[in-house]
Image (spheres, helix red, strand yellow):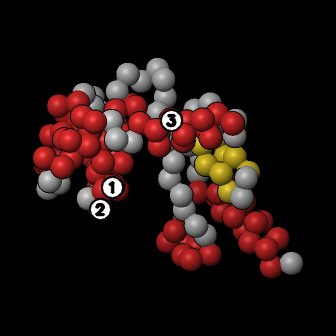
């Protein structure tokens, strides 16, 4: 979407760890710790590629493998520095009717579940047209 629309759209990523996934919350908090060091997306991608390795020691090893400062990252994870932020994202998602992932909002219009690009393109094109009027 970013490649197609460039600066015509604004992308915001919010955390919504699913309660039935025992390691999702820790992974969400760890992602924010990686973001402190400018490595959110590489860390995010690594976690999604390694979904069976999301325990605390795994989260720390992934960070180390990506070249993050281990002392800084580990302190962030161990202190649960981003617990409040993750909680706020979950509450906002619940208030917006999110009950699973992925859930994507385009100007308040929710697209739930994994969808093909054309679904997003149709909605984005409609919203851009409304903006032009």
Q: Secondary structure at mark 1?
A: helix
Q: Position of residue 20 (x, y in %)?
A: 46, 20
Q: Residue at x 65, y 51 (%)?
A: 105
Q: Is residue 47 visible?
A: no
Q: Is residue 94 visible?
A: yes
Q: Are marks 2 and 3 in contact (CB under 8 Å)?
A: no
Answer with the quarter of the image where residue 29 lies: top left
> Which numbered disc, 2 or 3, marks the residue closer to the eye?
3
Q: Secondary structure at mark 2?
A: loop
Q: Note whether 45 is above or below 81 in the view shown.
A: below
Return the disc, 2 or 3, that comes first in the chain's sequence: 2
Q: Note whether 23 is above or below 61 in the view shown.
A: above
Q: Residue at x 48, y 23 (%)?
A: 19
Left/right of residue 26 with respect to residue 121 in the rendered view: left
Q: Are marks 2 and 1 in contact (CB under 8 Å)?
A: yes
Q: Position of residue 60 (x, y in %)?
A: 18, 39
| Residue located beneath label 1 in the image | 35
Left/right of residue 85 with respect to residue 40 in the rendered view: right
> Which numbered disc, 3 or 1, marks the residue closer to the eye?
3
| Residue located beneath label 3 in the image | 87
| Residue located beneath label 2 in the image | 38
Give the CA distance from mark 2 to mark 3.
22 Å
């Amino acid at each position: 979407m970013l490649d197609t629309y460039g600066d015509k759209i604004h992308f915001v990523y919010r955390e919504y760890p699913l309660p039935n996934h025992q390691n999702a919350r820790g992974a969400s908090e760890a992602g924010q710790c990686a973001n402190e060091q400018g490595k959110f997306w590489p860390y995010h991608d690594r976690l999604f590629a390694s979904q069976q390795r999301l325990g605390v020691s795994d989260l720390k090893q992934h960070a180390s493998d990506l070249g993050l400062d281990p002392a800084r990252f580990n302190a962030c994870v161990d202190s649960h520095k981003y617990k409040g932020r993750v909680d706020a994202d979950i509450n906002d998602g619940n208030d917006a009717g999110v009950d699973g992932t992925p859930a994507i909002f385009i100007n308040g219009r929710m697209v739930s579940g994994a969808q093909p690009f054309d679904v997003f393109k149709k909605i984005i094109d409609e919203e851009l047209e409304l903006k032009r009027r």
